[in-house]
Image (tube, rainbow, N blue to C red):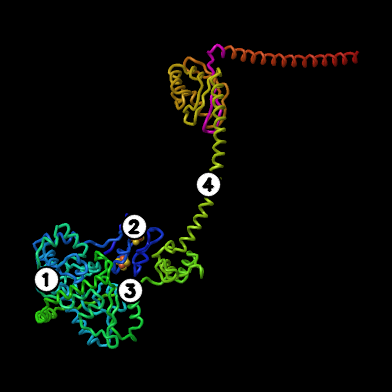
Amino acid sequence: MVSINPDKCTSCYTCVRICPVKAISVNIKNPQPEIQPERCIGCGDCIKMCVPGAIYYRSGIEQAKQLLATKAKKVAIVSPSISAEFDDITDYRKFVQMIKSLNIDHVNEVSFAVDILAYKYLSLFGDFKGRYYITSCDPVVVSFVEKYHPNLVNNLTPFVPPMIAMSKIVHKKYGDDIKVIYIGPDIASKDVALKFSGSSKVDVVLTFPELRQLFKEMHIEENNVEFSEFDPPLGYKGSLYPIRNGFIQAADIDENLLTSMVISVEGKKEMLESIDEFEDNVKVIHRHLHVTYGNSLAGPGITDKGNQLFKEHLVIKYANKRLMNFYRAEWYHNLQEYITIDYNRQFEPNNQRLPDPPVAKVAEALKTLNWKPGRHSDCGQCGYASCRDFAIDMAKGIVIPEMCATFAISNSKYYSDTLKELNEKLTETRKALKETEDKVESEHNAATQALELTDAMLEKLRAGIVIVDYKLKIIKSNSTFCTILGGDAEEINEVIPGLAGADLNKLFTEDICNLFDYVLKNSESIDGRDVRHGESLLNISIFPIRENQVAGGIIRDMRAPEVQRAEVTRRVSEVIDKNLEMVQKIGFLLGESAADIEKMLNSVIQIYNEKK
Ligand code: SF4
Ligand code: SF4
C-alpha cells in the first residue's frame, strides 16, 4: 500500500520512529528504511511525516481513468469527509455535478451506509450476550487488531465497513454489472477494497488529492457545471461520521458517561493504548470500545492536514445543510429496504507480532549502545519509551544503533578521535613515503648511471656480447655482436638498440643456440669453444648469469685482424710455454739418467778394483 522512493529518501529515520507498529525497518546492510507490507496497518503517518516526500501510497488514478473511459455504468460513492476537503467548493451540488462530469452515472453518499451500520451496531450492543466489542468501521483499527491483537478478532463488531456496505447498497439498487468508485480520505481502504468481490466489490479507491488531480486533468471546475443532487438513498446523521463521536451520534447510542455501554476514543496513541488495555482488562471494563485512528479529517488522503476544529465545523455545517432537505419518511423507507442486505463479515487473525528476542541479545544490544544507567536517560528521541525498548527492537533486527542520539553523538566523538589519530598516522606515513621516494629516486639514478656506464663499456669491447633469457630472446647485445652477425642485424640494431627481444634462433646456427640452451639448462659455463658460423669461425664463451633464466655470451670473430693477431700471439705463447715445459721435463729426465749411469759405472769400477 505504501512504498519508499529511495532516490528521495534522506535516511532521516523519522518514518521508522513514527510508525506505530514498527512496520518500517532498517538494518546494517541497508541503512535506507524498508517497509514491511505485511506488518503495515495503512495509517499513513509515515507519509505525513516524511519531509522529502519519499513515501507514497498506491495511486488509483490510472485505474480510474481506464474505468471512466468504458461504457459500463459507473457509480461514485462518496465519504461525508468530502465536506472538509472541498471547502473551496461553495455548494455541494456543484461538487456532485463535477464528479458526474468525470463520466460517472450516479453519485451516492456513504453516509446512508453509516446510518444502516449505526442501526446494526445499536442492535448488537443492545443484545451483546456478554461479549464486549471493538467497533470495526475504521480499517486501520481492524488491521491493527488482526495483526497485533489476534486474540481479539472475535471482539471486532462483525460488520463490513461503510465503504463496502455502500457498495452492497448501490449494487442492489443499480445491478450487479455496475462499476463502483469510492472517494474517501483514508488509504487503508485501498487494501480493504481488494478483499471484497461480487456485490461488495469496489473497483477503484480514490483519495481526495487523487480526485482533485482528475478534476484538473479533465478541466472540470465549479464554474463550468450546474447543480446536481446526490442520488438516493440519502443519508441522515451518517454525514457526521467523520467527526469525533459522529458514529455514536448517528447510532443514537447513549453517550451519558454514567450509563453508556460504549467508551469512545480517537487518535493514534489512544487507539494503541485502549486496545492494549481492552485486551488486558476486558473482563473488568465491561464496555464496548468505539475506536478510530482519526484519519477521516487528517489522514494522508486529505489535502490539508491541519485545522482539525475548522474541518469538524465544515462537516457539521454540511450535515446541517443536508438535513434541510431531509425527508424522514423517505429515509426510513430506504432504511427498511436496504437493511435486509447481509452486512456481516468475519475477521481472520494475521499475527505479525515479532517474538521477544533472547535476554542475551538484548543485553548485547544495550552493550553496543554503551548503555549505562544515568548516561542514557530514556530520552525518547528514538521514538521508543525507553532505551530497553529500543534495544529489544535492535535485537529483533528492525532498528540500528545509529538511531539512538546518544550513541550517534558519542560515536561521532569516537569517530573524530579516530579520524585525528588516522590523520597523524597519515602524516607520518606520507613523510616516510617521501623519504622512501627520495631514496628510490637516488638509487634509480645511480642504477641508470651504472647502466649507462656498462652500456658504454660493452660498446667499447672488441668482442661481441649478448645476453639472452631462457627462451633465447635477446635482452641486450653490443654493436660488435651485431657486426659479427652482419647483414640485417646492424640495420635492426639502429631501430631496436641492442636487438632487444630478437630471437637468437633466427640469428645463429642451431649448434650455437644449443650451446646457449645447454648453459641455461645446466648452469654450467662453456669456455672458448670454436664454432663455425657460415663463413666465419667464432670463438664463443657462454656463462650463466641467473640460474636457468639468463645467460651471457662473449663471441669473437676469429677472422678479425686484431683477434687473429691476439689469438696467434696467445696461441704461439701457449705453444712456446708448452715446449719449454717439455724441454724442462726432457732435461730433467736426461739429468736424472746421467746420474744413474754415473752411479752404475762407479759401482762397476768399485767391484772391479775389489776383484783385482
Ligand atoms: S522519513 Fe522519508 S526521508 Fe526520512 S527515512 Fe523515512 S522515507 Fe527516508
Ligand atoms: S502506513 Fe502506518 S503502519 Fe504503514 S508503514 Fe506507514 S506508519 Fe507504518
Checking the image for residue 426, the label placed there is 4
Camera-side residue of 308 and 529: 308
The amino acid type, in three-letter code, at marker 3 is Tyr
Q: Which residues are magenta?
A: 542-563
In front of the other: 63 or 404: 404
Residue shown at the point (90%, 15%) measured from the top left: 610
The residue pinned by badge 2 equals 9
Task: State the separation of the CA atoms marked 3 and 4.
Answer: 53 Å
Q: Earlier in the sequence, mark 4 or mark 2?
A: 2
Label 4–label 2 contact, CB within 8 A: no
Crowd rating for badge 3 (residues with CA inside 10 Å; few <14, some 14–19, many 20+): many
Mark 3 and mark 2 lie on one chain; the one further toward the N terminus is 2
Please give the label number shown on residue 230. Answer: 1
Q: Name the front one of labels 3 and 2.
A: 2
**Image coordinates for residue 321, horizontal then vertical, percent:** 15, 74
Cα separation between marks 1 and 4? 77 Å
121 part of magenta stretch? no
Residue 148 marker: 3
